[in-house]
Image (spheres, grey):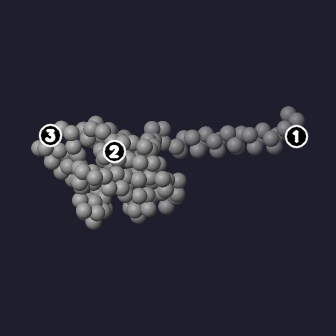
Amino acid sequence: MDKDLMPARMLTTRAMGFFAAVLMALPVNAETVSGNPGGQIVNFALHVAELRVAEEPVSFDGACDSACTLYLSLPAEQLCVTLDASFGFHLPYGVGARQNVVAANYLISQYPDWVRHWIEEHGGLSHTIMRMGAEEAAKHLPLCGVLA
């Protein structure tokens, strides 16, 4: 083998090894939430339960509103936020008065304490959306891409 090619081949082999290690370290099914307006609470609750069992990471990189905020019920170790993340909270609506009360109680019961306290400090859930910014969430969740 040509002596001039050996350093280049070794460097290429090492680079390929490093690249493979990085790819293997990345979660295969990581989910990024951005611009999610929410939807039916039941659908989000089921999806969050799947993510919890699979221990799949979720990153927030934009708006997560309404039922989407159920992602916040996942363990903090599964979550991270970017500086573009925000969370919109409001009372559930659309099914019927009784069902909406049940849905609101479910949402509140699923949030971690820091989210419940934040909602209480801002007047509680109402029909008007209240928005939590990334700076508040980052007090309780890690920033994406930042090692502890």
The residue indicated by pointer 1 is 4
Nearest to the eye among marks 1 and 3: give it.
3
Question: Which residue is depicted at the point 88% across and 35% down?
Answer: 2
Q: Nearest the camera: 107 or 79?
A: 107
Task: Determine crowd level at label 3: few under 14, some 14-19, many 20+ residues with C-alpha closer than 10 A.
Answer: few
Q: Are marks 1 and 3 in contact (CB under 8 Å)?
A: no
Question: Which residue is depicted at the point 15% across and 48% down?
Answer: 101
Q: Amino acid at mark 3?
A: Gly
Identify the mark at residue 96; answer none if there is no mark.
3
Name the quadrant containing residue 94. top left
Residue 66, given in percent of the width and then of the height, sits at 31, 46
Residue 85, given in percent of the width and then of the height, sits at 44, 52
**Mark 2 or mark 3, earlier in chain:** 2
**Mark 2 or mark 1, earlier in chain:** 1
Q: Tell me the CA gap for discs 2 and 1.
A: 57 Å
Vertically, is 94 above or below 148? above
